[in-house]
Image (cartoon, rainbow, N blue to C red):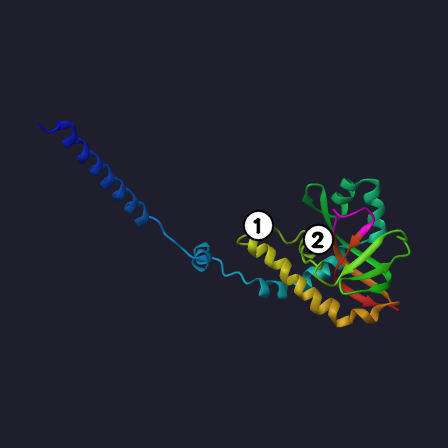
Amino acid sequence: MANPLRRVKYPKILLGVVFGVALVAGMIADTTFVDTTSATEIRGSDFDPEEYTAQAFPEIRDLIIEQAVPLSELAAAIANDPAAAGAEYGQDMGAGRFTYPVSVTGTVDEVDSDYIYLSVDELPDADVRMPIGSALSGNPVRDATGTIAFGDFPDQNAYQSVANYFRRIMLAEVIEVLDPPSLVGKTLEIYAGWVTGGPADTYLLMPVSIEVVS
């Protein structure tokens, strides 16, 4: 005689399989799959970082010039009390780091493919450089005035794109127009964004304005 338990077991398994397939099918039916483009459309964003930065850079440049603290004054304030200096002059980036709008006048000692090296009378022992290669960054310029915030943009990519396009403008409109190799021995007046976090007495200036004064 056939085992009656065996006749019951298979229908239960079959029922479970059918139920599982139906559940998965229902989940798929209720799920919307999107690619990157349609995801952007769902967020309702038509943000164009290139257009934005072309319009924003002149204003940010002017604000940095207006708000800039002389680098020697800032260096003394940071040496005395980094947190107080940050609160007075800079933008708090978290983890003890601050971004500042700064100004400095210095003489070009050397230019290579990566940096313009400067001597600053008020900071004789400092390493003051302007990146002109891969180390050039738009982040300190984006952040130095406190008028551009992460929450203003659709997402992290858009926020970072602003810095990237600022970098392009800085390179094309501020640095390359001066023909850096020709600057050796000349005195420059510089306005820039600068962020803390590097070695002591080292200043990597991300320029928004460079004027040859002599």
Q: In this rendering, is residue 161 above or below 80?
A: below
Q: Could you tell me the amino acid type at mark 2?
A: Ala
Secondary structure, mark 1, is helix
Please name the residue shown 64% across and 58% down the image: 163
Query: What are the residue bounds of the magenta stretch?
Result: 195-202
Q: Quadrant of the N terminus?
A: top left
Few, some or many C-alpha atoms within 10 Å of disc 1 (few <14, some 14-19, many ≥20)? few
Q: Is residue 40 above or below residue 7?
A: below
Residue under pointer 1: 151
Q: Is residue 69 magenta?
A: no
Element type at mark 2? loop
Give how far across and how far down residue 7 sits, in percent.
14, 32
Write the residue at 83% across / 58% down.
104
Is 201 or 153 nearer to us in this picture? 201
Q: Position of residue 15 (x, y in %)?
A: 20, 37
Q: Nearer the viewer, residue 61 or 12?
A: 12
Left/right of residue 118 with respect to residue 192 in the rendered view: right
Q: Which residue was labeled with disc 2?
A: 144
Q: Position of residue 107 (x, y in %)?
A: 87, 63
Name which of mark 2 and mark 1 comes first in the sequence: 2
Q: Residue at x 72, y 41 (%)?
A: 96
Amino acid identity at mark 1 = Gly
Q: Is residue 198 magenta?
A: yes
